[in-house]
Image (tube, grey):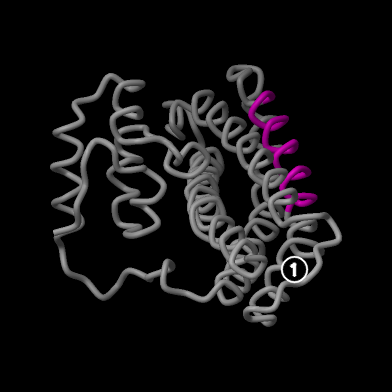
Amino acid sequence: MMDINQQTIVGELVATDYRTAAVFKNRGIDFCCNGNRSIADACEKKHLDADRLISDLQEVAARTTSAVADYNAWPLDLLADYIEKKHHRYVRDKIMEIAPFLHKVRSVHGESHPELKEIEILFQESAEELTAHMHKEEAILFPFIRKMVAAGETPIHAPFGTVQFPIHAMMQEHENEGERFRLIAALTNNYTPPEDACNTYKVTYSLLKEFEEDLHLHIHLENNLLFPKAIALEQQQQA
């Protein structure tokens, strides 16, 4: 059984076994943007029983299944390709789908549910920021990571000094999006439609919930896997 204790780092555990993400999510523990905390720190902040949480994590980790992708074993260039082709494409597609739904729901139900206006504004802000964020990754950071992988043990010059600079900027932007969606989740009562919600209202909340869940995995793959491994590779090449 995997060694899980109170000093285990949340993000590192999820990086090792993504199935544990569901346990953290059910407790309201952020494993992506704030995954660099120990289980003890995370439980203290949420007033949770750390031993009970560890027991649940160990139960999940002990299960045997071949259905879970072992992202931690993937080469860096494959991981970057996967994030770009799956998650970046998903974000762009879903923005085009969700935005019109949100606008329609706010137009029809906004008077009786004024929170819809703020939800729409927050999602529009997220759509704009994520679009710019992904472009920077695709144009600057990911190509450089691929170059490092191709170079093997040979150090290559980073036009931005070190890969840590763009990574730090991307992680800060991840934190901003995480906070934005925490606000959306609160305003939607964790994506629970009100009693008078029409089908479009219900579909919109379901899409927003799915979008947030995909964003959590997306950010986790970068913050807890791609970014630290890219930094380690650069340091190894320069040693």
Q: Residue at (63%, 18%) from the top-left corner? A: 114
Residue placed most toward the observer, 167 or 106: 167
Q: Which residue is mark 1?
A: 144
Q: Residue at (36%, 21%) from the top-left corner? A: 45
Q: Is residue 27 above or below residue 153?
A: above
Q: Amino acid at mark 1?
A: Phe
Q: Residue 95: where, in percent of width, then height?
A: 69, 51
The quadrant of the picture occupied by the C terminus is: bottom right
Q: How many marks?
A: 1
Q: Main secondary structure of the magenta part?
A: helix
Left or right, residue 4 beside residue 200? left
Give SS at disc 1.
Answer: helix
Q: Residue 178: where, in percent of width, then height?
A: 57, 36
Q: Residue 94: where, in percent of width, then height?
A: 64, 55
Q: Residue at (45%, 40%) from the top-left corner? A: 36
The quadrant of the picture occupied by the N terminus is: bottom left
Q: Is residue 56 above or below residue 48?
A: below
Q: Which residues are magenta?
A: 117-133
Q: Farthest residue to the front: give it.
A: 239
Left or right, residue 163 beside residue 83? right
Quarter of the image for residue 126 reads top right
Residue placed most toward the observer, 77 or 115: 77
Left or right, residue 183 beside residue 192? right
Quarter of the image for residue 218 reads bottom right
Q: Residue 103: where, in percent of width, then height?
A: 71, 37
Residue placed most toward the observer, 75 or 215: 75
Q: Is residue 90 magenta?
A: no
Left or right, residue 89 beside residue 64? right
Q: Residues within 10 Å of mark 1 (few under 14, many from 20)?
A: many
